[in-house]
Amino acid sequence: MTTQNSGLFIAFEGGDGAGKSTQAAELAAALESRGFAVLRTREPGGTPIGEKLRSLVLDHGHGHIDAHTEALIFAASRAAHASQVIRPALERGEIVLTDRYIDSSVAYQGAGRDLGTDAVRDINQWATSGLQPDLTVLLDVEPEVGRRRRTAGDAAEDRLESEADEFHARIRTAFLDLAAARPEHYLVLPARLPVDELAAKILARVESLLPLSRTVEA
C-alpha cells in the first residue's frame, strides 16, 4: 500500500487521436504494479452530471451549440469533476490521472473557437478553485495524423473531432504555446513515437515527482 499526506495530479493533453487514453492506461498499470493507488478519470465526464454534459456537448444531434455555451458546459463539468472526484482522491493520497483538463478548454474553446485563451482560462480557474496538475503530459499530434487514427476502421468522430483540420491546427498550436510558457510543468512528446517508448518516457518523468515520503509495500 502507499501512504502519504497528499497525492499527485497528472493531466494528459493533446489533440484528438494523440493517444492520451492509451498512455494514461499504461502509466496507471505501471504505477499500480508497484503498489500505488491510482485513479483514472476523464473530461468531460468523471461524475454522473459530467457524463450527461459530455453527451450534450460531444454527441451529434443536439442542435447548434454556440461557442460560449460550449465553453461553459465544459467548465461546469470540470467544476464537478474537480470538487467531487479529483480533490477527494488527492486528499486520500492517490495519484490522479485525467484524460484532459483545463488546457483542453483553453485550446479548443479559447483558440479553436476564438473565445480568447485568457478568458477561458479564467473561467476554468474559477470553476476548479485554482486546482492545477503537478504535471501535464502533452502528446503532440499533427491534425491529419490524428484524423487518420480517429477514423481507423469503423470509428465515428464526435462533434469536435469532426471539425476541419484548420480547427485542429489552431488547437495544436495553443497546446504547444501553453507548454512553452511553463516548460517545468510539462512533458511534451511526439505522439508518433511507439507506445512503449512513450510510456517509458512518461513513467521516468513521473517517478521524479513521486515524494520521497511515499512508501511502497510489496
Image: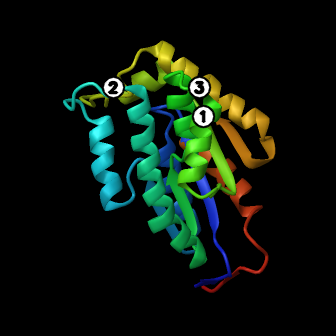
Q: Is residue 197 visible?
A: no
Rate crowding at label 1 as few (under 14), some (14 to 19) or many (20 or more) other CA atoms within 10 Å. Answer: few
Earlier residue among tags 3 and 2:
2
Earlier residue among tags 3 and 1:
1
Judged from this view, the residue extending furthest toward the left is: 61
Disc 3 secondary structure class: helix
For label 3, the residue is 172
Position of 115 relative to 39 (above/below): above
Describe residue 127's horizontal placement relative to residue 161 as left or right: right
Position of 113 relative to 80 (above/below): above
Earlier residue among tags 1 and 2:
1
Residue 18 coordinates in the image, percent (x, y): 51, 34
Q: Amino acid at mark 3?
A: Arg
Discs 3, 2 touching: Cβ within 8 Å: no
For label 2, the residue is 151
Q: Amino acid at mark 1?
A: Ala
Describe residue 203's horizontal placement relative to residue 78 as left or right: right
Residue 102 coordinates in the image, percent (x, y): 56, 45
Quote the CA–CA distance across marks 3 and 2: 19 Å
Residue 63 coordinates in the image, percent (x, y): 22, 27
Discs 1, 2 touching: Cβ within 8 Å: no
Q: Residue at x 72, y 63 (%)?
A: 207
Describe residue 96's horizontal placement relative to residue 130 as left or right: left
Q: Nearer the viewer, mark 3 or mark 1?
A: 1
For label 1, the residue is 119
Q: Amino acid at mark 2?
A: Thr
